[in-house]
Amino acid sequence: MATNSETNSAVFELAILARLTWNLHSLNNEGTLGNVSEPRTVVLWNGQRTDGISGEMMKHIHAYWTWIGASSGADYPLCDGCRDFRPQRADLISKKLTKNDNVAALSEAIECVLCDVHGFLVQTPTIHRQSVVEFGWVVGLPGKVQRDLHAHARHAATERGVETTSAGDTGSDEQAGTQEGVAAQMVYHRPTRSGVYALVSLFQPWRIGLNEIDYTYSLDDEQRKKRFELVLQAYEWTLKRPDGAMRSTRLPHIERAEGVLIVSAKAVPVPLLSPLRDDYREKLQELAAMQGCDVIPFADVDEMVAALERIKQRDPFKLERGVARK
């Protein structure tokens, strides 16, 4: 259960461990073979095959909502690459970074909120930043996932009685019109999946604005607080309105989210135990108590959002030796 420190202490780490019930989606796929789109399949330790949504996709969704939030506010600077949501991020502005001083170059790069939160790799000068937000695979619970493959067709106008050649056209022109009609018609197969999925995600607020070469903070407390709130907002949006593949025709039916938020107020890592276990909440309560972490349970999406809103009232943890750079 939550403790009194839930509303009045800093946040070192935050874990979201949950079971998500999503119906009739196709948010992540392996690719297309011929005219068939193949869904993601993962294999668990015991050989069981199940449905999955990659951590890369979940992280992309979170990054997208972070970018949306940052783009709509004047308090969130974005580099030239992130302003257009380009995946290279700080690598696109490498020529603007200080040469022969990696400490200064890293501090300049993490002025961008998206580079700071979601990480980057710059080739020259050689600097990188590991993301402060991490996602594992969103994994379908064995026995609680349904998959189906549906046939669809795109019909040519000629099939509805509209000729593609004029009455006077013959020979090669008539043949070209027929070929055009054939090319326009397409039969394809797309997957649809429904199930209960295990989610694991970790957020490290103590690293916001932290230059991890000399371990000093490149941002002041107010800037770090705003980015902390932005990341939590992006979590809310990610889980109540997930982005992803095939949403134009397979927008997910979000039914439920239940699980726990685990928060550490001091410099100890939060325990991570997969919701693939039926007893994950009980075991996490025990582990969190051993480490002095807060456990905030939620039984549905609205409770999860309310809990994240309360956490926004707290501050990101700050290393005592991580003095702000001048």
Image: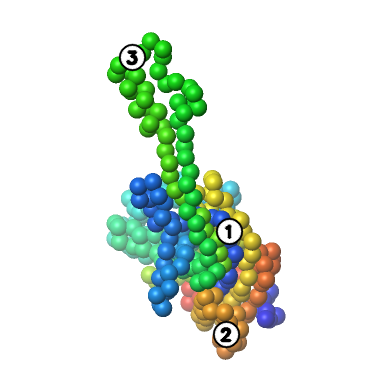
In contact (CB < 8 Å): disc 1 and disc 3: no
Q: Mark 2 highlights which residue?
A: 283
Relative to 288, residue 147 above or below: above
**Label 1 packing within 10 angstroms: few (<14), some (14-19), many (20+):** many
Q: CA distance from mark 1 to mark 3?
A: 52 Å
Q: Mark 3 highlights which residue?
A: 170
Mark nearer the N terminus (3 vs 2): 3
> Residue 257, percent across and down?
62, 66
Q: Is residue 18 visible?
A: yes
Q: Amino acid at mark 1?
A: Asn
Number of the front mark, 3 or 2: 3
Mark nearer the N terminus (2 vs 1): 1
Which residue is at the far bottom?
A: 290
Q: Which disc number belongs to residue 23?
A: 1
Q: Amino acid at mark 3?
A: Thr
Which residue does the image show at 45% across and 26% down from the upper left?
Answer: 158
